[in-house]
Amino acid sequence: MDPSRDLAVAPAVRAVYGPQDLSSAPAFAGGFINFGHWAGIPLDRPLTAEDRVRSQRDLYRLVFGALDGADTRAVEVGCGLGVGAALALEEFGFAAVTGLDIHPEQLARARRANAGLLARAPERLGFAHGAAERMPFEDGRFDRLYSVEAAQHFRDLTAFAREAARVLRPGGRLAVTSFFLPAGAEDAGGELAARLESFASGLDVAHPLASLLDALVGAGLTCVRAESIGDQVWPGLDRFLAGVELPVRWPRNFLPAYRDGLLDYYVVTADRPAVTADRPIVTTDRPAVTTDRPAVTADRPPDGA
């Protein structure tokens, strides 16, 4: 019996990350499964598979830069093939990383993809089966928690935030990057489903950004901040997709949806308060959100170029 069935995996999520193996799709490369961070990659020329891999690595690098994770124990929630966890160890000096995923098939792929590192340093890299909303770890196990383009699949952000706060030690830090509905577009789920099959099928959930921020604050985390990076994600992704033979056309609708203000891409960070005199430090500061959107300039490559 498939143990993931006890974790209420949505059918579309089970199919895409199970037998369909999204990491093998032409829109992705290098074992990563994210839309990429394209800052520093010229978009005025044809983009290559190497550019695509770099963009995905750079999204992880952006997250790791926000964590200051050297010599820390970390968990990646929604680790996929585990190549981001390996990057954390090899390039950023994390002491140990545990990759958590709800899909047994993804975990099997992760163990194959990282067989060498697992053999050389089993104390530094490991993988575990579990859900973002129900993590199989003891309280305070990790110094850092991160998630790269997985939160759009989480069914319950409140449960995720509560679990994240629980498994982080006092003084720990988390970083989550994914796409969410921005302020003013909280009711845009229906429009996104009409434009993007991933929302229509239930693969992606139309979470308002405010839902995640409120959940993190409600879980007792502090210094909750969100930074929009949509201008460094969507144009580059669309430029790359324009040069790939896609079996369907709807992925090209992400950029128009961003330009129409229906969704955006964010890096969200938060801290678990340190403990002073046996009592946590509590703050009532509201989450800080950087929402400035750049103007669309004439020299941006056209959507279909």
Image (cartoon, rainbow, N blue to C red):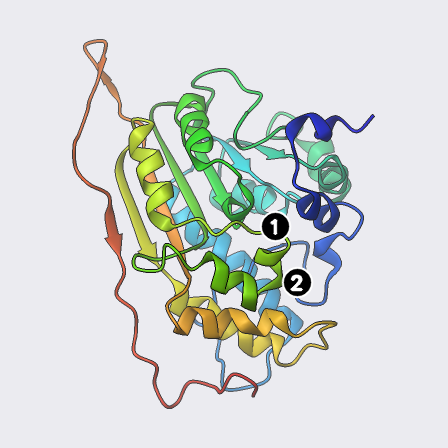
Q: Residue furthest left?
A: 284
Residue placed most toward the observer, 194 or 124: 194
Q: Which residue is drawn at 49% across and 87% down?
A: 302
Real-space Cα distance between discs 1 and 2? 20 Å
Residue 301 spot, x, y in % from top left = 47, 86
Asked which secondary structure carries label 1, the reply is loop
Q: Mark 1 points at which residue?
A: 202
Q: Residue at x 34, y 35 (%)?
A: 216
Residue 122, quarter of the rendered image: top right
117 on left or right of 303: right
Residue placed most toward the observer, 91 or 277: 277
Asked which secondary structure carries label 2, the reply is loop
6 on left or right of 51: right
Q: Is residue 36 visible?
A: no
**217 over 176 or under it: above or below:** above
119 on left or right of 76: right
Q: Mark 2 points at which residue?
A: 28
**1 vs 2, front mark:** 1
Residue 40 spot, x, y in % from top left = 44, 72
Task: Point out the tag, 1 or 2, that comes first from the N-terminus.
Answer: 2
**Kind of residue at disc 2:** Phe
